[in-house]
Amino acid sequence: MHNDIDHVLLHESTIMSRLDAMARDITRDYQGEMPTIVCILQGGIILMADLLRRIQLPLLIETISVASYHGGTLSSGVVSFKQNALPDLKGKHVILLDDILDTGRTLEAIRDRFVNEAGAASVKLCVLLSKKKDRPCEVVAEYVGFEIGDEFVVGYGLDYQGQYRNLPYIGVLKPEAIQRLA
Ligand code: 5GP
Ligand code: MG
């Protein structure tokens, strides 16, 4: 698994100290509230586990499952919800967690449904990574761990063909690993 990595972009210790700071910001911003954290499966699960244990607030946890990449290394642009029912978010202050903001279509589609269909009182976006690029939609995440270049990364929740999510760091795959699993 580690042999397939060309280089590490963000080491585990770097990610952990950034999560400390993000959790402090969230704790400060939601003082007196009980936010509902909605984790986007599967990519957001590692971030959820590590970030939530640092937040010093009462909170609720929900998950939602969507797909937009369908296995490759380029965003398909189509967001499919794997379930019709949305979590109960009526009047709730929601923090939507995902691994990465790429085109922004996934987070935009979910946020729209949370506000318009589920009746959330507010929805803020929190991602570990945000790719520096021109996005087709105007999506800004309120909480961003790191800005990275426009390249395909794996680890810390992010997969290629379902693998590499359990790498404790963020890395870039060797071209031969991409070809082997394609
Ligand atoms: P978006 O809708 O913003 O284009 O991308 C949404 C999803 O695409 C992310 O939640 C993530 O699952 C996947 N994705 C985007 N960029 C990358 C990347 O560099 N690596 C991996 N493994 N997945 C990515
Ligand atoms: Mg994802």
Image (cartoon, rainbow, N blue to C red):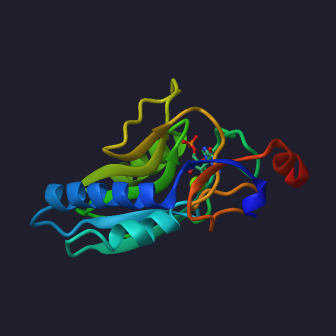
Query: In the displayed structure, does residue 99 sit left or right of residue 70?
Result: left
Res 25 → quadrant: bottom left
Choose between 174 and 165: the one closer to the eye: 174
How many numbered circles are shown?
Answer: 0
Q: Is residue 118 visible?
A: no
Choose between 11 and 52: the one closer to the eye: 11
Query: In the displayed structure, does residue 105 sit left or right of residue 60?
Result: right
Query: In the displayed structure, does residue 48 sit left or right of residue 131?
Result: left
Q: Is residue 108 above or below residue 89?
A: above
Q: Quadrant of the N terminus?
A: bottom right
Residue 113 position in % (x across, y down): 43, 51
Residue 133 position in % (x across, y down): 52, 27
Query: From this viewpoint, which residue is outermost toward the right?
Result: 180
Query: From this viewpoint, which residue is outermost toward the top?
Result: 134
Choose between 44 and 80: the one closer to the eye: 44
Residue 92 position in % (x across, y down): 25, 63
Residue 41 position in % (x across, y down): 55, 64
Q: Residue at x 63, y 46 (%)?
A: 153
Q: Is residue 34 visible?
A: yes
Q: Is residue 23 above or below residue 76?
A: below
Query: From this viewpoint, which residue is outermost toward the left?
Result: 32
Q: Residue at x 56, y 58 (%)?
A: 169
Res 53 → quadrant: bottom left
